[in-house]
Amino acid sequence: MITLDQYSAKIATAKTPDEVESIRFELFGRKAGVLTLAMKDLGTKSPEDKRTQGQALNVIKVELEQLLDARLAAIASESFGSLGESDSLDVTLDLPEAEIGHKHPIHEYIRKAEEVFGRMGFDTANGPELETEHYNFDMLNIPESHPARDLQDTFWVSSLDRTVLRTHTSPMQIRYMEKKKPPFRMICAGKVYRKDSDATHSPMFHQIEGLMIGKSVSLANMKAVMEQAIRELVDPTVEFRWRTGYFPFVEPGLEMDLRWRGDESKSREGRWLEVVGCGMVHPQVLKNVGIDPEEFQGFAFGFGVERMLMIRHQIPDLRSFFQGDLRFLRQF
Ligand code: PHE
């Protein structure tokens, strides 16, 4: 004989509506339900037993049905209750307008530089950030023993032989010259890496490299291109100064400093920020890629994107570009 306890415990542990319904089927299924069979079995009993047992079975049946329905209701309210905690959707809540983002200032600036140099006839190239020593140093006239290798605090890739995170975009000069026949003008923008970190240095930063080679490209052409580009890319009134500078892959080499604006508190030297390295491509570099330096010559330059932006927008710390603080980024 079926007992109420046996099933009430089972119903209480059902966790889903499906589990409740399968217990209901087990009890009341038309062919093999436990209660259905017990009811059928009454037919074989004496009239006396039929009456007493029939009454008892009816009580159990009503109680079990109530338990099953109550359990279903409880499961529904439990899941609704937890929904309230986790996924509530308050359709009456007045939401602020969705904010639409914009390009990161660095990428916006690179696009702008590509456009400015594009108007001056410069093609846009791209190259790998993981670079070989061959392209990053050797081909740029920086042999193994050369002290200039120490000028750049290189990240070596220990798992790969003679491989570095490029310390500058200059290896793209080589890759480009190996593929193309002069005359040409190209710029290449991208990430570069050096072991350095303070307000004007970050271990990862962006450079834009430029190269122009032809039969009569002069230092005067270089200065004209650079000055025009800097005025467009920083400000028409930007103050700059030219200094001689040393880079093994150019001869002569020059550096261009831009003046910090509105900061008279700094020492006289502190008011200038070194932004551009450039010069006439070294004859040895041209020979390295099979270009005859007697026939062709030209200039190359490389500048730091973050530093240009620092001057343009008077940003005191270059690391702000990479911290993802929306209060900073929204200003652009
Ligand atoms: N590659 C140099 C640097 O990173 C800059 C440079 C580029 C200088 C091209 C001369 C010519 O400092």
Image (spheres, grey):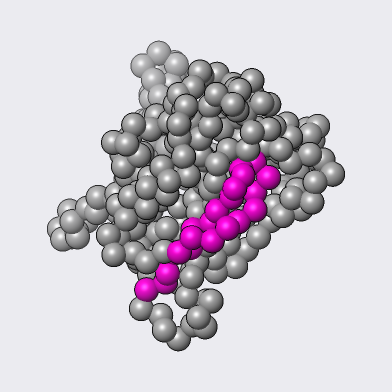
Image spot of residue 46 (x, y percent): 43, 22
Res. 240 image quadrant: bottom left
> Relative to 170, is 122 on the left or the right?
left
Instruction: Look at the image and tell me whether residue 115 can be seen.
Output: yes
Image spot of residue 34 (x, y percent): 46, 24
The region drawn magenta spans 241-261
The answer to whether residue 31 is above or below residue 155 is: above
Q: Residue at x 61, y 23 (%)?
A: 292
Q: Is residue 244 located in the magenta-colored stretch of the structure? A: yes
Res. 141 image quadrant: top right
Q: Residue at x 48, y 60 (%)?
A: 242
Instruction: Look at the image and tell me whether residue 55 can be seen.
Output: no
Q: Residue at x 39, y 20 (%)?
A: 29
Q: Residue at x 51, y 19 (%)?
A: 180
- Count of numbered labels shown in the rendering: 0
| Prevailing secondary structure class for the magenta stretch in the rendered image | strand
Q: Is residue 326 located in the magenta-colored stretch of the structure? A: no
Observer-nearest residue: 71 or 148? Answer: 148
Q: Quadrant of the C terminus?
A: bottom left
